[in-house]
Amino acid sequence: PPPPPPPPPPPPAAPPATVSTSTAPPAVFEDLDEKYARGELDEEAMLKEMQATLGDPETNRQNFQAQLSGERNAQVLAENPAPEGFDLDGSEGELQGAEEDLLAVQIAEAENALAALQAEKDVLALRRKQLEANAERARRRAEDEALAGREGPPA
């Protein structure tokens, strides 16, 4: 029998990683791989399909750099200003607000701890009363048994 035909050439190396706002489902890439394997797409057509799905690598690279540099954040903050009285620039007011929030949380935690300690104290007091009552009953029972033993059996 003749040898099997050689496998199709592997797909081209993936372009450099880029950031894109679109997210293509894996099925899109599987479809491209299948078309490439069947010879329906050449390398250039496959790259064009991928760019249509993922976006232009250079544009994606520029967007990523703008995000890294903080330029994008500045633009978003300019378009959507913070509510009045709320600073996002790391000023004293913002830090003071964060410190106050932290203190409020710490106070609430301490109050919870105090409430837990008070509840534990109440439980211990009730258990002490219960133990004292049990001890008193046991003492009376022992006295009653001792008296009954001295008097002897009833005639």
Image: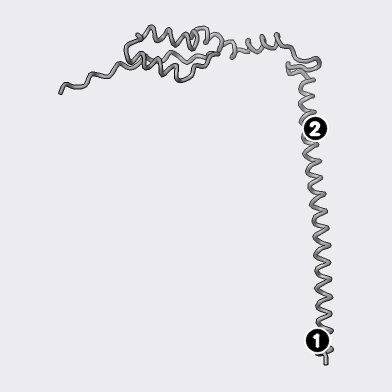
Q: Amino acid at mark 2?
A: Ala
Give left or right: position of 11 versus 74.
left
Residue 21 in which image quadrant: top right
Residue nearest the viewer, comparing 55 with 95? 55
Residue of label 1: 149
Q: Position of residue 73 (x, y in %)?
A: 65, 13
Residue beneath the point at 75% across and 14% down: 82
Residue of label 2: 104
Label 1 element class:
helix
Residue beneath the point at 59% across and 13% down: 67
Q: Position of residue 124 (x, y in %)?
A: 80, 57
Residue beneath the point at 63% across and 13% down: 70
Residue 49 in which image quadrant: top left
Q: Position of residue 4 (x, y in %)?
A: 21, 21
Query: How far apart in space, not on screen, are marks 2 and 1 (Cα)?
Result: 67 Å
Give left or right: position of 26 versus 40.
right
